[in-house]
Amino acid sequence: MSEVRSFLERHLQSIFESDSLTYRETTDENLTLYEWYVTPHRIEGLPFHDFMMTEAGRDDTAGFALDPQPKGSSPQDKGRVRFDLANYQEQVFGESAVCSYTLLISKGTASGVEVLSYNESRVLVKIDSSWKVVHVHKSPSWNAPFQPPAG
C-alpha cells in the first residue's frame, strides 16, 4: 500500500471513529469541501466537521459523520460499519496528490447489511513533511438528474 493510500485510510478511519484529534492532524485548517448530501454550497474550515464528528460520537445518535441522516438506524447500529475504496486511483504530483474512488460504506443494522456509496476526490498536500487533506469533493454514485427538480 502506498504512503498516500495509508494516510488516506487513516484520515477516513478517524472520521468513522469520530476521532477529532487524528482528523485535525490529517486535515488542513483551510479545508474546503463540497458534500452534496449536506448542502449544495462549499463548506470551509474545520469547525463544521468538529461539530458533526462530536455529535456523531455521542451514544444517543444513530448517525456517523459520513452518514449524517441515517434511515432506520438506531444508536447501537452505528458502530457496525466498515469502508472500502472501490476503483481507487492515486495521482501524485510532487508534494500534492489527488485520490479519487467510490467510497463504499457497509453498515450492519438490525434489518441486515446496508451498503452506501459516494464518489469522492480528496486533494492532499504535503505540508511540513506531513500529508494533509485540503479539499474534498463528493458526488452521488448514481445517475443524478442534470437539472434540479422543478418546484
Image: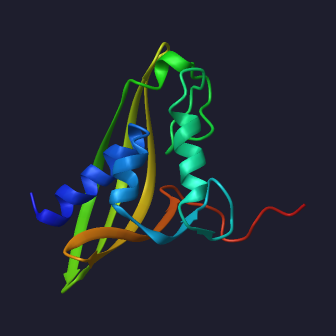
Picture residue at 49% right of the left edge, 45% below the top: 66
| Quadrant where the N terminus is found in the figure | bottom left
Residue 96, placed above or below residue 81: below
Q: How many labels does the image show?
A: 0
x%, y% of residue 54? 54, 39
x%, y% of residue 43? 61, 67
* Colour scheme employed for the rendering of this structure: rainbow
The reply, left or right, for residue 123 in relation to residue 56 is left
The reply, left or right, for residue 97 in relation to residue 75 is left
In the displayed orientation, state which residue is furthest to the bottom. Answer: 94
In depth, the one of 3 and 86 nearer the eye is: 3
Picture residue at 62% right of the left edge, 53% below the top: 37
In the displayed orientation, state which residue is furthest to the left. Answer: 1
In the displayed orientation, state which residue is furthest to the right. Answer: 151
The reply, left or right, for residue 20 in relation to residue 56 is left
| Quadrant where the C terminus is found in the figure | bottom right
In depth, the one of 33 and 51 nearer the eye is: 51
x%, y% of residue 14? 35, 45
Q: Quadrant of residue 4?
A: bottom left
x%, y% of residue 124? 32, 73
In depth, the one of 56 and 85 nearer the eye is: 56
Residue 149, placed above or below residue 80: below
Picture residue at 50% right of the left edge, 15% below the top: 111
Picture residue at 55% right of the left edge, 20% below the top: 75
In depth, the one of 94 and 99 nearer the eye is: 94
